[in-house]
Image (cartoon, grey):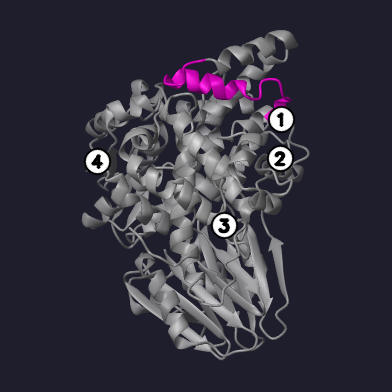
């Protein structure tokens, strides 16, 4: 797990100072060694976090034995020993034991088809020096980030966006459509970043670039197989055993490491089950678990239960070594640093928890953490999934009654978490089932968001609609008729990768810790799409089949309890702790000077939220994040 970056310039040789700046910008991702390769008009950068083959044989940039191919690679190939065995049978010889070397020779042998053989998380670039062609790929589920820039005969890429803007001539034109995404969804789906000409390479895609002609091509090599097919197994116990075996296989692969491993254990079912099964896979290995004390009262105000009690309970029952990280965050000190590491103005406080847990793990000598991210997205664990159960009731309610219910919900006191959820549910209650489903992803209706932008910004945004972007994704799975599976596809294609995986990677790598996600093992992902939906959502029971597996390892009081949130008390921060920051950065003068948001509407939004008329804390957080991002990435003024 490392950091990669690079540049190709059709008309100029590569400046050493630029390459060194790019290398320095992502040094936190690879504290064990940093190096680069420069040849004429191509430069490649690598910063290494040594996990497999800790010797110099694992250092990068890495060359094949002929010296013609050079690779920079970030990630882990969990089945690389299987691939290596295949290559050894073909006569290949290896210097070391790293998965990087396996990947390099796999590409030399199979070309782009090697991607279909990989089970892992990766972003890599291979340069063929003889024909001057670059090949870059991003893993199937987008666990590892990869940003690209291609304009005016200059190509740049990097694990983090900040490495790309080291190039002083990069075009920093703002993409107002992306800003609309951050305001309405709190994250930006697909390729879009706040910079119009810097994009995310989509998961399951690769890009090729001919450095001589600068012709490029982006190709999709994988998509999540939601095609309507279900496994024809009627016995629930058989599905429990199949799911359990897939988890065992995933953990056996993903505990591959030459350095100590640790576990995120929140006290929720996903991360706890991962740790519990790992204990079964490698019974002689002590489970070194890390959790966070979020503060029970603060989380109740956000509408979530606190996990710490359950983390302590399970650690005692299963004899985990539990490290409790204190989450008394200094939000004013941490906010800008968080945005800097995220590369994007995501509006969530969960990244801070990941950062502090990873930091605590690193201080305890742990360089790799395994967690439960992805369990909700594969097996249906969010409240918005439960909301789909209401469809059978909503469709049978007369329209006049539906309208009255909406009016009633609009008048509820939003200080209570239940009322907030009911009000959110009512926003699209008069809409179609598809639009209701899409609406569950939204934190702010499009027409309300439009008011927050200036007329100039709205000209750039045009008729762009964030939810339509999500809806368009469903065109790729026309044979999947289940509304729940359609939603899970959207989760995996957008929220999971562009929100959860982005902060999961960036905030752990900020302190040089690798984060692994066993639920996103490719065999498990593909298997999950074949499970009948009744085993995902059983009545109102979320993650039904996963909970049946968990019954073998975990106490029932942990499995069947209210969902907890992995975040901080955003509403409390916005209403109390961040008042001064809001007054400064979202003042009418500052907002007017920036020219993106409408100062009058922003002021009204803040006032209405303060008075409890609306629940706009996350929208305000989003605008603070955007301002912090613009200051640091566009203006070039590092803060925090």
Query: Cα distance, mark 1 to mark 2?
Result: 8 Å
Earlier along the polypeptide chain: callout 1 or callout 4? Answer: 4
Quarter of the image where the C terminus is located: bottom left
Distance between mark 2 and mark 3 Cα atoms: 21 Å
Q: Nearer the viewer, mark 4 or mark 3?
A: 3
Left or right for 412, reference 112: left
Instruction: Give 2 or 527, whichever is nearer the viewer.
Output: 2
Location of mark 3 (residue): 194
Disc 1 to disc 4, C-alpha distance: 41 Å
Q: In the rendered image of this protein, does residue 319 appear above or below residue 199?
A: above
**Screen quadrant of the N terminus:** bottom left
Marks 1 and 2 in Cβ contact (< 8 Å) = yes
Magenta region: 412-435
Decide which of tag 3 and tag 1 comes sooner along the chain. 3
Measure the alpha-carbon separation of dots 4 and 3. 31 Å
Residue 486, position in %: x, y? 67, 35
Contact (CB < 8 A) between labels 3 and 1? no
Q: Are marks 4 and 3 in contact (CB under 8 Å)?
A: no
**Mark 2 or 3 closer to N-term?**
3
User: x, y (%) of residue 457?
Assistant: 64, 52
Question: Along the polypeptide, which appears first: circle 1 or circle 2?
Answer: 1
411, above or below 326, in the image: above
Circle 1 residue:
434
Q: Residue at label 4?
A: 328
């Amino acid at each position: 797990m490392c950091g990669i970056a690079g540049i190709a310039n059709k008309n100029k040789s590569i400046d050493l100072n630029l390459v060194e700046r790019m290398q320095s910008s992502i040094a936190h991702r690879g504290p064990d060694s940093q190096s680069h390769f420069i040849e004429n008009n191509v430069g490649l950068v690598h910063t290494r976090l040594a996990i497999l083959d800790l010797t110099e044989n694992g250092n990068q940039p890495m060359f094949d034995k002929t010296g013609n191919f050079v690779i920079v690679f970030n990630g882990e190939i969990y089945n690389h020993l299987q691939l290596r065995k295949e290559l050894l049978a073909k006569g290949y010889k290896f210097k070391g034991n790293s998965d990087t070397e396996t990947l390099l020779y796999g590409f030399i042998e199979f070309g782009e088809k090697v991607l279909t053989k990989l089970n892992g998380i990766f972003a890599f670039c291979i340069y063929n020096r003889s024909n001057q062609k670059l090949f870059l790929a991003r893993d199937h589920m987008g666990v590892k980030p990869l940003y690209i820039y291609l304009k005016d005969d200059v190509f740049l890429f990097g694990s983090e966006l900040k490495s790309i803007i080291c190039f002083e001539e990069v075009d920093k034109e703002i993409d107002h459509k992306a800003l609309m995404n951050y305001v309405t969804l709190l994250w930006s789906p697909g390729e879009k970043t706040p910079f119009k000409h810097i994009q995310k390479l989509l998961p399951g895609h690769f890009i090729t670039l001919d450095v001589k002609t600068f012709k490029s091509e982006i190709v999709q090599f994988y998509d999540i197989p939601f095609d309507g097919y279900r496994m024809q197994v009627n016995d629930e116990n058989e599905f429990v055993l199949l799911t359990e075996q897939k988890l065992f296989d995933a953990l056996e692969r993903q505990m591959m490491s030459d350095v100590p491993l640790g576990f995120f254990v929140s006290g929720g079912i996903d991360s706890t089950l991962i740790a519990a099964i790992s204990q079964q896979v490698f019974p002689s290995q002590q489970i070194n678990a890390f959790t966070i004390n979020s503060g029970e009262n603060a989380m109740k105000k956000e509408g979530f239960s606190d996990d710490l009690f359950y983390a302590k309970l399970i650690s005692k029952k299963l004899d985990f070594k539990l490290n409790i990280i204190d989450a008394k965050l200094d939000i004013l000190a941490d906010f800008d640093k968080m945005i800097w590491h995220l590369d994007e103005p995501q509006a969530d406080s969960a990244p801070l928890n990941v950062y502090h847990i990873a930091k605590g793990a690193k201080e305890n000598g742990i360089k790799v953490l395994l967690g439960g991210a992805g369990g909700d997205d594969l097996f249906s664990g969010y409240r918005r999934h439960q909301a789909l159960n209401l469809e059978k009731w909503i469709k049978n309610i007369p329209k006049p009654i539906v309208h009255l219910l909406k009016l009633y919900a609009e008048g509820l006191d939003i200080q209570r978490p239940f009322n907030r959820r009911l009000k959110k549910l009512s926003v699209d209650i008069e809409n179609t089932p598809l639009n209701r489903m899409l609406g569950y992803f939204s934190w702010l209706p499009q027409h309300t968001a439009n008011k927050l932008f200036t007329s100039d910004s709205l000209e750039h945004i045009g008729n762009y609609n964030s939810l339509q972007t999500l809806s368009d994704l469903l065109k790729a799975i026309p044979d999947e008729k289940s509304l729940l599976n359609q939603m899970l596809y959207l989760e995996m294609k957008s929220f999971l990768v562009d929100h959860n995986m982005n902060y999961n990677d960036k905030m752990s790598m900020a302190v040089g810790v690798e984060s692994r996600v066993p639920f996103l093992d490719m065999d498990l992902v593909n298997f999950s799409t074949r499970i009948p939906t009744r085993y995902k959502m059983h009545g109102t029971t979320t993650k039904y089949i996963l909970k049946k597996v968990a019954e073998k390892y975990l106490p029932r009081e942990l499995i069947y309890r209210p969902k907890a949130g992995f975040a901080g008390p955003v509403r409390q921060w916005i209403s109390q702790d961040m008042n001064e920051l809001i007054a400064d950065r979202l003042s009418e003068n500052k907002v007017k000077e920036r020219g993106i948001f409408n100062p009058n509407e922003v002021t009204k939004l803040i006032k209405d939220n303060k008075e409890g008329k609306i629940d706009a804390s996350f929208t305000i957080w989003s605008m603070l994040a955007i301002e912090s991002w613009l200051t640091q990435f566009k203006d070039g003024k590092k803060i925090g």
